[in-house]
Each structure stands twice: as structure tokens, then as C-alpha cells.
Image (cartoon, grey):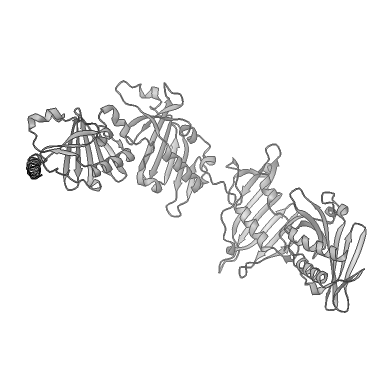
Amino acid sequence: MLAAAVVLLLLILAFEQHRQKVAPHKTIALPKLDAGHLRALELEVAGSTLRLERSDNGWLIVQPFRYPALESLTRTLLEDLSLLQAVNFMPHVADHELEQFGLRPPQLTLRLEGYASNQVLRFGSLTPIPNNVYLRVDNQLGVYVVPNELWYRLPRDVEQWNDWRDRRLAHAGTAWEKIDTIAAHTDIQPLFVLQKNPTNQLWRLVQPAPAKRADSERIQHFLGIAQSWEAAQFITGTHLPAQQVLGLEPALLKLRLAQGTNQHVAIDFGAPHTNAPALVYARDMIFNTLLAVAQTNTVDLLKINPWELFGDHRLVDPMITNQIERIEIKSGTERTVLLHSPTNGTWQLTEPIQAEADTELVNGLLRQLQGLEATALEKDVVTDFAPYQLSDPPLSYTVWRQKPPGAATNTLMAGVDFGRSILESGLTFTRRHDEDMVYLAPTVLPSRLPSRFFQLRDRRLWDFTSSDVAKITLQLGDKTTELARNVRNIWSGPSGQLNLEQNTEANTALASLGRFRATRWVVRGNDKFGDATYEFAKTAEKITFHIRRGAATETHSLVFGKVSLEGERYAAAQAPPDNEHVIFIFPETTYGKVLQLFRAAK
């Protein structure tokens, strides 16, 4: 055992001494790179150079051509450079030994130009061990071994340089929000010209004349589409067809996006591609680059009617309710006038009757008016509106602004007229108050607007409490029943006094019926009451309230009709002040109270 211990000690000493002799040199870390401080990248392959420089709009290829660089590739490259670490290092490599590492000459040279210092990375051949490559850094002795992901990310062939181009067709960078002119024109005439007012930031479609309102949302949508356009192909070479053959001299169509006189996008579109009919030739005039692009979302889009593409289709501009004094509606021979009280926000009908208006319905009308949009621009210069039935329109809405202090008259805030309808197309000629243009709008739009006074009146037909009711007459078919209050103020019917539960149900039902609101007005007129559409005679369901207010008495009646396919119940009543019958949709929750009264009477 003693001999074994001596032998083991000698072995340990021998191996420890050997390990100290063959210990590898300490690995020298790669110089750290701050990608945010780089101003240029230059890649040299086989005597050719690809140079990228940082600009206000990102990275720009400046050699051997000038074109925006693909941001995702440059960003990933910079990240890889920032994280690059050596897996091995050989400190003593003589210059004549560089050839065996593929470093004389290097396979690829990457120059990194910073604002404070520069670095040069020279890549050699791949190592025998997979997934690595030899690398030498200028001003650093020795050769590094680094992972080859960066090597494969770099374009190692001139043919790959086009892969580093940003394929987006329209390069405005950070200037998209600053664009104030959008124009497209052929060699002969403009297709459209849009300009933004620098004061109010509103767009106008100034060409084709006359100038028209433009829709900012439609323009932003167009600019969003333009930013998504991509080049299908970059066309290079020395044996290209003549510009006339490409349809670019002169160009068949030109698109310009500018801020003042500074053009940010300038694309010329030419003839269909020789080998791909779905593509057209194009030239980026700012970067003097020949391309091929899809025709469907570029040329075809630009040739759409400018008003459809950019026009403001609204028939009424946004309004501030508190600034409105009155609304006038002309429907046939009937004229409706509503006055607004800015103090409490209520509305009053003054013509053709004096009555309270329903504030919710009037505000709904204003919302509907502001939501009206034309489908098409029929004619943009009109001198005679009679053929469109717009010189004396059958339906018109006019909104007047409150008089400012010191003003003698009101000013017109908004107005829209509806003229003749075209049955075949389902469209109606329409006109704004501030334009001499005729639009087409779906006929269904004016039909949905309240156009007669009763459609805007207060949806409460009356106002009474259960204690105001002295007697109720209930009719169901040919049977009539009465409930009346006895001397104890308890409801009694043909079979005597109601019990406590029935009496409470009756009072609860009367409280709801005394202040119910119609869901929606349908039609007005005594002649409409007998219309079979509503089946009032068939249902034969009626309640009459006998009201006592001090010494005065009054009577109100409710008649119920059928339930429509939409689940809405028709009802009718005589409405003050003219006691004309109005037909409306009765709230179904309140109808449950009506059934309580019929049950109590039964």
C-alpha cells in the first residue's frame, strides 16, 4: 500500500506538470461593436464593393447603386455584429500562413465606419470543424474562429446585392405625414391632383376641375396602400430594351408625392412586362432604378375615378349641436320647424303644430344627417337643377346656426336636398347646400330619415299617474269591461272589489301606461287607422282611461294591433293638439302591464 501511494503521487505530479506546459493561450475577446454608433458599412467581394450609409430615413445603399436598403437585413446584421464572439483564437499566425485560412486574399472584407472609430473585419474560409469561419480583425494580431451565421448572412456574391434592396416601391421614410401634394398624370393630362391646406390641414381634390372636397381618411388609406407596394423585380443589365419599348419615354403614367416642392416619391409607370403580363415596367425617378411592379394595385388603382378614390362623400359636414338654432324640414307641402334651446338642450316643434319634440329623436336625426354619404358624383358643374328635381326638391333638410353676437341674421350650417329617384338603380339625386354639384345616394337613405313633424314629436302621448285615473274601460273583441274606483279608492269590476294583489297590479300597470314612450312612430292620419296592415279591427284590443284632474276630466284611448314579423307590436292613439290618429310601435315591456289590467278585469 505504501508503494502504491508513492506511485500515485508521482503520477499526479507528472500529469499536473504536463497540463501546465500544454495549457492553451488565453483567448482574446473580439473588439466590442456598438451598432448604434455606426454610420456606414462597406462590403468588398471579389473586387466589387457594396456600401451602405445611415440616413434620416434608415440605411441607404450608395454603391454600386443608390437605393434604400432593406431595414430588416441591416438590423439583423448589426445585431449579429454586436453579439459576435470568438470560439477560438490563434495568436501566432505569420503573414505567409494566412493563405491556409483563406485570408490571403480574404474571401470577404467588411468595413465598419463609426462616428468615433473604424473597424475592418476580414473573413476567410470555413473551418474543417463545421459551423465556424476564420476571421481577422485589422490592428489585431492572430486569427479568430467565429460562428459562421454572420458569414452566411452577408452577400458573398454580386448577384445577391439586389436582395439587400428595400422592395417597397414608395420610399418616403419619415416624410409620409408631411406629404401635402399627391398627383398622378399621363403625358397629356392630369388624372388627379390633391393638395393639403397648411392652415386647416384639409385636403382638396383640385384636379380634375372644379375643385372638390377630399376625404382625409380615404387619402390616408391610399397612402397606406402605396406604402405596401413592392417591386416584383429589379431590372439591371446593359442590354435593356429602349425606353420607348418599356413605355417610359414618355411614361404612360406618373405618380408624385411631395411636400411643397420637395418630391418624396416619384414613380413612372410604363408598358406591360414582356414576359409577365401581370407586371408593368416602372422607374423610380428619385433613385433612377428600373423595376417591374404588379399592375393591379398600382396602375389600375391610380386610374379609378378620382372622386371615388379620394372624394369626400359626406352630404352633411360635422355639426356642433349647441351651435344650432333651428332645423327646417320640407317634405312635399308640409314644412316642419324645430327650435333648439341651448340652455337645456331641448327641442320644440313650432310648425306645423306647437308641441314638444323628442330630444333623443332630433339628436338621432342630426346623427343620421351627418352620416349621409353619396354613392356617386353625377355631375360636378350644374346650372339647371330642374331635370334632377332639385330646384324644388320633394324633401330637404336645412340646419341654421345661432346668430353670433351683433349679427343680424342666422347663417346656414348645413343643408341637403333629395330630388328625383331612379327606380331601376335604387338611387336618388342629391345636392349639398354649399355646392353646385349633383350626387347620387341610395334611395333607402332619405326613406330612413324622419321627414314629418309627428316623427319627431315627444314620444310621450300623455302624462298621468295611477291616482289620476277614475275609471278604465277595457275592450277585447266584442266584450267590454269596466274597472272603477269605489269609495275606498280600491278598484272594482263586474265581479266586485279586486283583492289586494290585483289592486296593486292595476295601479302599477296604470303608472307605467301613464308615462310610457312610443318605441317608434310609424305613420299619422285617421285614414291610416283602418289600414289592414296593422289589423286593429281584427285584434279589437282597446283600453280607455278616464282621467280626473280636479274638476276637469279627460279621456285617452290605446288601441293595439298585430305583432309584425320583426316582433314589434303596433298601437294607435289620438295625439294632441289635433287629435289625429298616430300609429306607433308599442314597448313590449309595457304591454306586459296591459295584460295585468285585462287579467284583473277578467
171 displayed left or right of 448: left
Tell me which corner region of the image, top left, top right, bottom left or bottom right, holds residue 596: bottom right
Q: Is 593 or 399 nearer to us in this picture?
A: 593
In the rendered view of the protein, which quadrant contains the C terminus? bottom right
**Measured along the vertical axis of the image, is residue 68 above or below residue 335?**
above
Q: Position of residue 559 (x, y in %)?
A: 84, 59
In this view, 339 is above or below 105:
below
Q: Point out residue 193 in the picture as x, y percentages from the top left corner.
A: 46, 41
Res 374 seen here: yes
Name the residue at 46% across, 24% down. 277
Examine the rendered structure and indicate whether residue 203 appears above or below residue 457. Answer: above
The quarter of the displayed image where residue 70 is located: top left
Q: Quadrant of the N terminus?
A: top left
- Is residue 137 among the parts visible in the rendering? no
User: Residue 121 placed where, x, y %?
Assistant: 18, 37
Instruction: Say whether residue 69 is left or right of residue 48.
Output: right
As rendered, which of 146 and 245 lies closer to the eye? 146
On screen, residue 529 above or below 67: below
Q: Residue at x 62, y 67 (%)?
A: 345
